[in-house]
Amino acid sequence: MERGKRQAWSSFFGGAGFYIALLLCVVIAGVGGYFALFRDNSAQEVSGNQENVAVNDDEIQEPVLTDAPDPSPVQDRPGQEAVESGAPVQVTLPEVTEETEAIVPEQPSVVVAPLSGETVAVFSMEALQFNETLGDWRTHNGIDIRAAAGTPVVAAAAGTVSAVDSGGSMGTTVVISHADGYETTYASLQEEVPVAVGDTVSSGQEIGAVGNTTLTESALGAHLHFAVTKDGEAVDPAEYLPQ
């Protein structure tokens, strides 16, 4: 019996059956290797696809850049921090110099009337007025204020005495220059006056006394002839004097 088995196995390994079994083992090993290789490749592809998907997700999440330039930072303005914090802002005014003061002309400051009295002749440069002294009709470049002889006459505004005259038809006259092209004229004064050309006078300072020295208005008696000019043109003293 045992000898029969040995002869059968010898016959198998020495015959065609041995080669058939060997071929089947080779086929089985090849199929197993193929599936193992296929499985490894599939795993690599899946891993590669996952990596690609992750990269694409990252790219989508990144901010989209445009060609527009970034806004430039706003420069701080002086006092901006103080304004934002609520603190008071110090403002520096430009320095006032003699040149800047000369640019803005000073308006004449009228404080007082030159004389208190009755106005007997008004300003009239358009309509003619009858002149009792000369017996004719003519314009009148000022106002005539009647008062007792010797009544003090004062400067209506601060200025500089530009003329003192006693030889004209208007009698003793004092002219004062003021700021911004204004001049005031005080005529029919008494011959003696307390001011001279070049003197600086203040508003309300006495510059003479009421007289009757004018040749063209002597019929009025003692009075002051008061006139005002702006840049050489006569203006109504009533607009110049305080009401």
Image (cartoon, rainbow, N blue to C red):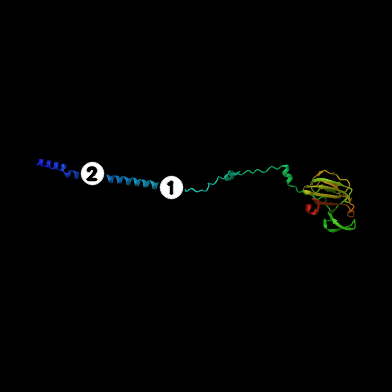
Residue 18: percent from the left, percent from the top? 18, 43
Residue 107 lies, in percent from the top left, at 76, 48
Q: Is residue 202 left or right of residue 192?
A: left
| Label 1 vs label 2, nearer the camera | 2
Tell which circle, 1 or 2, labels the residue nearer the N-terminal end.
2
**Secondary structure of residue under mark 1:** helix
Image coordinates of residue 26 in percent, x first then y, are 23, 44
**Residue in front for this viewpoint, 168 or 65:** 65
Q: How far, Cα to Cα, is label 1 from label 2?
A: 49 Å
Going 19% across and 44% down the picture, which residue do you hit? 19
Q: Nearer the viewer, residue 108 or 243?
A: 108
For label 2, the crowd category at 10 Å Cα-Cα, with few meaning under 14, some 14 to 19 and many 20 or more, is: few
Amino acid under label 1? Glu
Secondary structure of the residue carrying numbered label 2: helix
Whether residue 176 is visible here, answered yes or no, is yes
Residue 78: image location, x then y, percent: 61, 43
Amino acid identity at mark 2: Val
Q: Are marks 1 and 2 in contact (CB under 8 Å)?
A: no
Q: Which residue is mark 1?
A: 59
Q: Residue at x 85, y 56 (%)?
A: 139
Dot 2 corresponds to which residue? Answer: 26
39 or 24: nearer the viewer: 24
Q: Residues within 10 Å of mark 1 (few under 14, many from 20)?
A: few
Q: How many marks?
A: 2
Q: Quadrant of the N terminus?
A: top left
Q: Which mark is residue 97?
A: none
In the displayed orientation, state which residue is furthest to the left: 1
Asked whether residue 111 appears in the rendered view, the answer is no
